[in-house]
Image (cartoon, grey):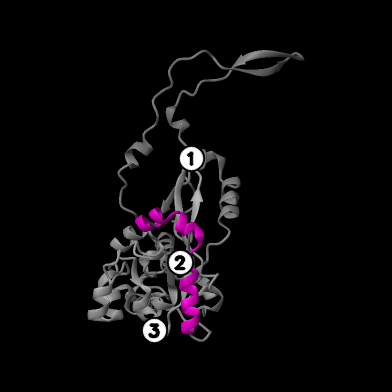
Amino acid sequence: ILSAPQLLRTHGWDSTVRRLRTPADLPKNIGTLPHKAARLLKHMRDVGVQCKLRTSPWTLQRKDEAIKRGPHKSALEFSDFLTEEMTSMVARGQWMVLPYNLVRDEPTLRIAPAGVVPQHDRRPRTIVDYSHSNLNQETVRLAPSESMQFGRTLPRLLQRIVHADPRHGPVHMSKEDVADGFYRLHLRPGDILALGVAFPPAPDGTPLVAFPLTCPMGWVESPPWFTTATETGADLANLALASEYDPPPHRLDSAASTPPPPPEPTLPLFVEAPFQGLSAAVPSPPASDPAALLPAPRPQRPQSAVIYVDAYLA
């Protein structure tokens, strides 16, 4: 984990951040997109997501108190897991860990506690409580709030399922997760110190502080900045579908248009029908045309996706 101190001493803060973190996911030509968010996305790529605070910098006494308090007790109980998790994120260029004494005098440094949430039959989950340090409350909201345009996911999905045309058969849903969603957006190097996290101390007792190099989970601005990118993609995809869009053939088109084979002979099915005031068994007519079993084509244009934070629901 402690691979960054020497780099910091020889190259400085900004250079260390740029050397350690993963390459940007936003392409170089993103500013040319036919979308009103293109310039903002280009700024996010070139400069990074900004973390601006409306309160004065912390005093040395407050920093020392925060590092003395350290992480949440759950982080100490799961220190082996947390160390393994952080090692993996450092290797992916998402975080770096430094001794506290190297950054103590940095004027913009703030420290929030790390924690771990146990989960039944699943791996524990790492969290950072940026509300405990009041960082979330003191963050200036710079991300465009209108970018989070897909709220109330569950009610919208239920409404679409209830009103789906039954002629098309049962409703199928597909959830595609964007791996490491928030971690795909770079932070502005100079603002990272405000997002410091108290980490369990090193084996020799050295206090450690972890720093996100990309947007972290738990920070109030990560969701709207992330959806600024993902929902721009959804806007462009839906715009293409709403135009004279002729998609290329799909590899499953032939299988989807092939009628199913005739059913195997079975015992006749019977339905109850009235006969002279009584009920008589009348066989139901067999489906002689296999094509009749296929659902009718959808009359409406498809919609590419419904998005909630970091998940596409098609």
Q: Tell me the SS state at disc 2.
A: helix
Q: Which residues are magenta?
A: 59-85
Q: Residues within 10 Å of mark 2 (few under 14, many from 20)?
A: many
Q: Quadrant of residue 240?
A: bottom left
Residue highlighted by disc 1: 296
Identity, as a three-letter code, of the amino acid under mark 1: Ala
Q: Nearer the viewer, mark 3 or mark 2?
A: 3
Whether residue 277 is visible, yes or no, is yes
Whether residue 306 is visible, yes or no, is no
Q: Tell me the SS state at disc 1.
A: loop
Q: What's the CA distance linking mark 3 and mark 2?
A: 35 Å
Identity, as a three-letter code, of the amino acid under mark 3: Asp
Q: What's the CA distance linking mark 1 and mark 2?
A: 35 Å
- The verdict on residue 128 being magenta is no
Residue highlighted by disc 2: 227
- The verdict on residue 65 being magenta is yes
**Label 1–label 2 contact, CB within 8 A:** no
Precedes in sequence: disc 1 or disc 2: 2
Numbered mark located on residue 105 in the image: 3
Q: Nearer the viewer, mark 1 or mark 3?
A: 3
Image vertical order of residue 290 relative to residue 121, above or below: above
- Residue positioned 48% across, 40% down in the render: 296
Precedes in sequence: disc 1 or disc 3: 3
Image vertical order of residue 23 relative to residue 295, above or below: below
Give the mark count. 3
